[in-house]
Image (spheres, rainbow, N blue to C red):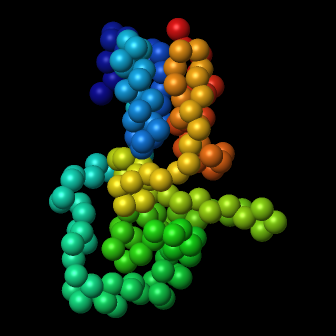
Amino acid sequence: MNAPNIAPQRKTYDAIVVGSGITGGWAAKEFTERGLDTLVLERGRNVTHGEDYITEHKPSWEMDFHGQGNKQEFEEHYPRQSMAGPFNAYNKHFFVKDSKYPYTFDEEEPFLWVRGYHLGGRSITWGRADCQDRRVTVNGDMPVLQPRTAASSLSSMLVLSMRLC
């Protein structure tokens, strides 16, 4: 039903953060603490602590292939994701299936795009710990975590490009 007499509501935000991982979550925290009206965009599902860690503390003898994983499944559905160090049978449900969401890259400059569509970003993918080496810079009076490589968090790139009041 169309309501012609009602004007559409528009909202203007001071900051938009893409991704709720460690960088995005921290950026949103800093922005809101400074009084900025902040919108956080997240593609993935919510991860409920405990409930969604379906393999946590599960002994290998209760896992398929004794916890080593189905190599054929990894090759067919996770050819790129399985190249990431922490990928295994215990955490594969936090990685995107390459067979469902493929990507390509220049073979001369290979790029491993590790992805997981869930609230909390790659901190969940890496076993709930983000061990990336990061530098801290200051943009105005705002501390900014910079990824070591451009392949890291999109949200940190957005933070760098924003001009704060």
Q: Position of residue 86 (x, y in %)?
A: 46, 68
**Residue at 39% of width from left, 84% of height from top?**
69
**Residue at 34% of width from left, 23% of height from top?**
2
Q: Position of residue 45 (x, y in %)?
A: 32, 50
Considering only vertical position in the picture, is 24 above or below 127? Answer: above
Corner quadrant of residue 95: bottom left
Instruction: Report if residue 99 is visible in the image.
Output: no
Considering only vertical position in the picture, is 115 above or below 39? Answer: below
Considering only vertical position in the picture, is 165 above or below 68? Answer: above
**Residue at 47% of width from left, 15% of height from top?**
14
Instruction: Report if residue 164 is visible in the image.
Output: yes
29 or 9, nearer to the observer: 29
Considering only vertical position in the picture, is 65 above or below 38? Answer: below
Q: Position of residue 99 (x, y in %)?
A: 52, 72
Left or right of residue 154, residue 124 in this image: left
Corner quadrant of residue 89: bottom left
Q: Quadrant of the N terminus?
A: top left
**Residue at 39% of width from left, 70% of height from top?**
92
